[in-house]
Amino acid sequence: MKLIIPKSTYPFIVILILLFLVELFAPTPIDWTQSFNSDDKRPFGSYLLMNLIKTDLFPNKEVEFKTVPVFNYPESKISDPLKNYIFISNNLEMQKWDVDKLVKLAENGNQIFIAASSISHPLADTLDLSLTPNVMFSNLGKTVRIQKLENQNISLNKKYKYEKAFDVVSIEKFNRDSLIVLGRDVDKNIQFIKKQFGKGNIFYSCQPLAFTNYNVVEANNADYIAGAFSYLPNQSIVWDEYYKPTRALRHSSPLRYLLIHPPLKLGFYLLFFCLIFLLLFQGKRQQRIVPIIEPLRNTSLEFIQTLGSLYYTKKNHKDIADKKLKYFKEFIRSRYHIEFKKENIKELSSRSGLPEKTLQMLFDQSKSIETLTHLTQEGLEDFHSKIEYIYNNCK
């Protein structure tokens, strides 16, 4: 079966193709999603930080990736090799049993490095601090934050500028006897601290965006990362991949994962519409032969013929002609919505497709029959043949 596309659909097909090409070749917008994943190359991923850890900050040291909560980490023994545990996320939601396990790791001599703009209540209680958003009117309009490290031997009194990629939060209400301040911003707001637990320490920064791809390549902010990690000894790394903002996506449907990535989303929609077109056009090509349905029989004509035969046997030719004329007029009225009159002959000819002359002859003959009191068989047969001609040839 030949596929025929209506010409009226050509403009829509052209517009659809143009929209697809515009979407295909349009510049890809920057995705500012905060993922902090080690393999994410977007501005707020940690791909470049992981490269720094492997090549410059902790060279030749093993990096282990964890995708489970801290509570599920293997039990730490004093005889085990010491490690640096790194947690970077926008919201570090740890339960009490996770925090207890983390403290035990630190007490055995491991180093814990945390960068998060929001932490759970059990972790805040353990560190004995609270976070305060800097919602002062003077801070709301800021697009730049400047930070520095307290240890002049590390930072050489450098200041690090963060444009846009920072969190408006600071560390407040902390125990000054148990915490050591390692970094502030230029407004003296505390950003980076250390607390000792047994043989190890927990380092905490409230600026996780400072450790993302965006700030690795921005100005000299990579030096700030190096300074912050210089407090960690040169030993194996355990990198957390569980407490990330995208963790919920790993437990959702694959379709949601497709729709949040523009290239995968475009490919999915393209595949979907191609399947729709395939079903439509392939279905037309392979559809079954449409059966021929006979039109309904005209029972009115059969009724008229039956009556005509009945009257014809009684030889009352005038009465038969009157009945035929009556049913003929009703046929014209119901089919063409017009009366069988002289002034309507032209209109009836146009609607029925019959010659105007034929209709005029039938009309004149019907008028003549109406005035007669007796009709011969030949006259009835002639009148009957004209009416049958109209029945068989009208449209």
Image: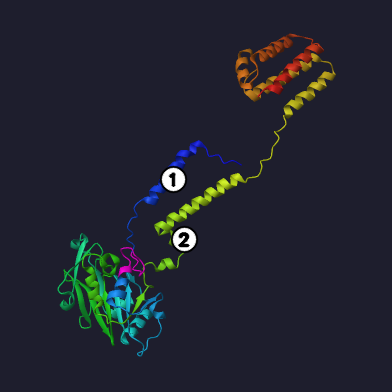
Q: Which label belongs to residue 17?
A: 1
Q: Nearer the viewer, residue 9 or 130?
A: 9
Tag 2: residue type? Leu
Chain part drawn in magenta: 34-48
Residue at far bottom of view: 79
How many residues crowd mark 1 within 10 Å: few (<14), some (14–19), many (20+)? few
Q: Position of residue 151 (x, y in %)?
A: 17, 78
Q: Nearer the viewer, residue 70 or 136?
A: 70
Identify the residue at image location x=36%, y=90%: 79
Is residue 43 covered in magenta?
Answer: yes
Q: Position of residue 243 (x, y in %)?
A: 37, 72
Identify the residue at image location x=73%, y=27%: 300
Image quadrant containing the N terminus: top right
Q: Quadrant of residue 346?
A: top right
Distance, label 2 to label 1, CA atoms, is 25 Å
Q: Tell whether 272 sits left or right of 198.
A: right
Identify the residue at image location x=31%, y=84%: 110
For residue 46, say whether it is visible. no
* 52 lies above or below 21: below
Residue of label 2: 255
Q: Tell whether 9 sits left or right of 241.
A: right
Q: Quadrant of residue 83?
A: bottom left
